[in-house]
Amino acid sequence: MTEVVHPTAVVAVSVASRNPALALLRAVARHRLAAFGLVIIAALIIIAIFAPVLAPYNPFQQDLYRVLAPPSRIHLLGTDNLGRDLLSRLIYGTRVSLFVGIVSSLVSAVIGVFVGLVAGFRGGMVDAIIMRITDAFLCFPPLIFILAMSAVLGPGLQNVMLSFALFGWTIFARLARGQVLQVRELPFIEAARSVGVPATRIMFRHILPNIMAPLLVAITITVGFAILLESGVSFLGLGVQPPTASWGKELRIGFTYLEAAPLFSIAPGVMISLAVISFNFVGDGLRDALDPRLRGANRVPR
Amino acid sequence: MGKYIGIRLGHALVILAIVVVLVFIIARIIPGDAIMAAMAGSVDLHDPSVVERVRHQYGLDQSIPVQFVVWLAAFLRGDWGTSIGTGQKVLDMFVQRLPVTLELFLGANLWAIAIGIPAGILGAVKRNSAADVAVTAGAIIGVSIPAFWEAILLIYLFAVLLPIFPPSGYVPFSENPLLNLRAMVLPTFVLGTHAGGLIARYVRSSLLEVLGQDYVRTARAKGFSEAAVVARHALKPGMIPVVTVFGLFWGGLLAGAFLVEVVFAIPGLGRMSVDAIFQKDYAVMQAMLIVVSLNVLLVNLLVDILYGYLDPRVRVRG
């Protein structure tokens, strides 16, 4: 079976280029808000990777003679309640948040897409059962579900990610199923079926590539969502455990000292917000770039 | 329409059954014997006969399916168990705290509508202008920044720097209406801006779609002013899909209320549930999960039916 190319493939991007990934990147960069998001995300990734180089201090080094110090040339953002350098802790916190966000989102996507593909492709009873289970999960507000699961599983980062994945798969299952239903009846699938291509091969080789565009949008937005939820869970005290630095956790401690050291509450929140907003901006830009119905009007290429 | 409602109702019942089983399973994966752990302080767990008695009292010596049926029957009777945190009946705790969260909810909805709908209309009408970018960016920022951080910022600005509102606390409306409203301004605003961002995005995209329709072009061609076209022809059909957002943000508002109630020390359902999670108060947690999900389920059902009523095309698609 050779590569089947069909005219309604959604993956096509407005810019004619030999490299679709590069073309996509260019289309996203043209979107004002998405370009901003891309820059911030790139900066956060660099900060996370080079945290030991960039952090001016050891994030765990306590200095009990200098607790809650105001910002100064020595400690740019001041120190926390144990005299640890706040800037260094926020830099290390980037690692936690990005890791949780990306891993939770990808695990959810893998499970969800698989379930959604099966439901959409098989149809009938299998589909009905899977979709009702998905609907049932979606009755729980995510934060509440994750809090309850974290309480049951115990605190800790792995459990936050596990709780997120236990919920997150439903988002992707719904999305993948909806997409499959649209693609399933197209002639090229019928053709593949008629020449005897096995069902699993049709699912992964022919249907999956055609639903990649909306998936990419959903994954991007879910990363931001997972970061937001992790910060909420950590803020309530069920996420990372001390002495690990996490933005939500820092914010929690900072809130106790709001009057004495406002920056201790403000700075971690800026980090969380920047990260979540950036992923949402990029997701929004991707959607506009990939959705052929929205093309035209304002963003005529060239 | 009858058939459409029937199908929706059937789905909702199936989903409800799965939700109830899910909640039961979540309560069952708790490591160790939750009740035993909770009782450890008050009874001697080294005495096997005491352990046996406690297990029997809570039905833990029965098979899982039997336990499920017993639990469900009791729940339906209104016997939601006793909280190990407060010693109160769980149902009473919910009834007591419901009005507080309800007030928070109503206030948040008012802010959300007051901010979200005008912003969405502005974005659609002035498409691609600086105002539109501001609306889109503002809406994304509104749904992206953590509610608890927004709450902390507002406390710092309007309670610490400019002491206009109290930093936290709650006064019942019946006790002192003025103090009650003053204490609720910041919490409802925090919740409302999040929902408002969501509404603005939906209003904008829905209105944009309507503005591209032929009959809107006809209205324009007849020489109506743009304001008249929007107000008389586009606004009403443009609002229909917005109905669905209410179903979407209902659950989000509930979750937001959890964090906001903690930050502002408001004694509502959210605070109670967070306390229950920390005290491993499983009776309260279980009841909370059921109440919250039932709430979302009912709102979604209502939205589906309302949507089918407003837009007949939906009924055919099922």
Image: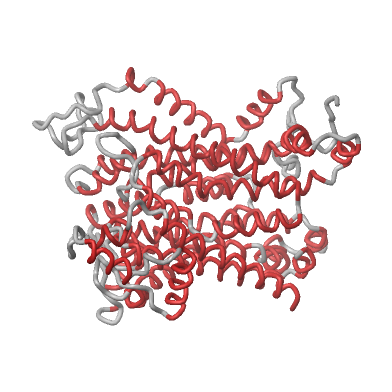
- Which of the 4 quarters of the picture holds residue A302? top right
Q: Could you tell me residue A49's position as x and y percent?
A: 41, 22
Number of numbered discs overlaid on the protein picture:
0
Left or right for A219, reference A53: right
Q: Front-most of A260 and A225?
A: A225
Q: Residue at x 35, y 51 (%)?
A: B31
Q: Front-most of B4 and B230?
A: B4
Q: How is the image coloured?
A: secondary structure
Q: Front-most of B31 and A267?
A: B31
For the C terminus of chain B, the quadrant is: bottom right
* Residue B257 visible, this orientation: yes
Q: Could you tell me residue A222's position as x and y percent?
A: 53, 42
Left or right for B260, reference B121: left
Q: Is residue B72 above or below residue A241?
A: below
- Which of the 4 quarters of the picture holds residue B124? bottom right
Q: Front-most of A241 and A17?
A: A241
For the N terminus of chain B, the quadrant is: bottom right
Q: Could you tell me residue A212's position as x and y percent?
A: 69, 36
* Residue B118 visible, this orientation: no
Q: Is residue A10 above or below residue B88?
A: above
Q: Residue at x 63, y 47 (%)?
A: A173
Q: Residue furthest front?
A: B49
Q: Could you tell me residue A151's position as x and y percent?
A: 35, 52
